[in-house]
């Protein structure tokens, strides 16, 4: 209970300090689990997404994060402030990818929101990179939609190489409509199909972050 109130307090303060606008909250599903997929240019992306979902939507995200990221001091502070049982990080272990996939699938089936940065890592330039297909494979396995999300402003506040963010109310978040893949649940998953669907999601993320996506 204490962590719940702590989450709310810090989320509200962060919103007032960093977030300029959050558009598209009405697009978030309320009765099912789903994947939220966003562009990634800064460690601050995780912070503002936690903030927006907790303070504005009263929802918690379970991010999939690399083992190395879990050891990072900034990320540890972030999870301390915003994590609880509903937002427990799913640890990405490169040696056990199928176990991670199974944990994420089960979480989605139980109604959790799983956060993914499909580019796989932060962009060095702030420009959108090619998206990986894992998010689509996960969505098809759990039979849940993917909600595309675009973030702007975090690169200016905390690009790669910076350990402390600038405090300025410039970050904008745009949430797109859920992308459903019902028509593909019973189809054979080929690399071509996964690539096609992943690119569709990335095109939406590009639109929401005012960028272009090179397929």
Image (cartoon, rainbow, N blue to C red):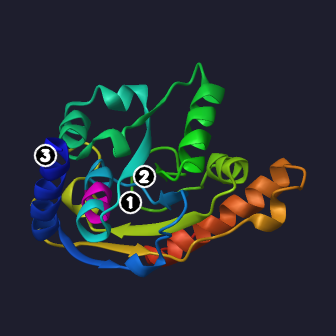
**Marks 2 and 1 in Cβ contact (< 8 Å):** yes
Q: Position of residue 148 (x, y in %)?
A: 52, 67
Q: Position of residue 158 (x, y in %)?
A: 22, 53
First reached walking from the N terminus: tag 2 or tag 3: 2
Task: Name which residue lies at 63% across and 49% down.
Answer: 132
- On the picture, is 168 further left or further right than 74? left
Q: Position of residue 196 (x, y in %)?
A: 76, 62
Question: Farthest residue in the front direction?
Answer: 1
Task: Look at mark 3 in the image and give the residue it sits on.
Answer: 164
Image quadrant of residue 83? Answer: top left
Task: Name which residue lies at 56% across and 49% down.
Answer: 108
Does the magenta-highlighted stretch encompass residue 49?
Answer: yes
Task: Name which residue lies at 24% across and 59% down.
Answer: 51
Q: Which residues are magenta?
A: 48-53
Q: Position of residue 82 (x, y in %)?
A: 23, 47
Residue 24 appearing in the image? no
First reached walking from the N terminus: tag 1 or tag 3: 1
Task: Look at mark 1 in the image and give the residue it sits on.
Answer: 126
Task: Look at mark 2 in the image and give the residue it sits on.
Answer: 123
Q: Dot 3 surroundings within 10 Å: few (below 14), some, or many (20 or more)?
A: few
Quadrant location, the N terminus = top left
* Secondary structure, magenta segment, majority class: helix
Task: Name which residue lies at 84% across and 54% down.
Answer: 192
Q: Dot 1 surroundings within 10 Å: few (below 14), some, or many (20 or more)?
A: some
Q: Dot 2 surroundings within 10 Å: few (below 14), some, or many (20 or more)?
A: some
Element class at badge 2: loop
- On the picture, is 196 further left or further right than 103? right
Element class at badge 3: loop
Compute the Cα span from label 2 to label 3: 18 Å
Residue 74, above or below 124: above
């Amino acid at each position: 209970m204490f962590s719940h109130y702590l989450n709310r307090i810090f989320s509200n303060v962060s919103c007032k300090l960093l977030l300029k606008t959050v558009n598209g909250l009405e697009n978030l599903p309320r009765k099912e689990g789903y994947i939220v997929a966003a562009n990634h240019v800064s460690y601050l992306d995780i912070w503002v997404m936690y903030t927006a979902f907790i303070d504005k939507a009263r929802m918690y995200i379970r991010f999939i994060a690399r083992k190395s990221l879990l050891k990072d001091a900034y990320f540890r502070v972030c999870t301390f402030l915003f994590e609880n049982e509903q937002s427990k990080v799913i640890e990405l272990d490169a040696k056990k990818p199928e176990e991670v996939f199974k944990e994420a699938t089960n979480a989605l089936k139980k109604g959790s929101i799983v956060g993914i940065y499909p580019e796989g890592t932060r962009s060095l330039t702030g420009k959108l990179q090619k998206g990986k297909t894992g998010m689509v494979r996960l969505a098809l396995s759990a039979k849940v939609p993917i909600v595309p999300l675009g973030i702007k402003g975090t690169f200016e506040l905390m690009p790669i190489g910076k350990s402390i963010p600038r405090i300025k109310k410039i970050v904008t978040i745009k949430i797109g409509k859920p992308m459903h893949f019902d028509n593909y649940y019973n189809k054979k998953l080929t690399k071509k199909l996964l690539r096609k669907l992943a690119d569709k999601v990335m095109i939406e993320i590009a639109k929401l972050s005012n960028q272009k996506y090179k397929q």
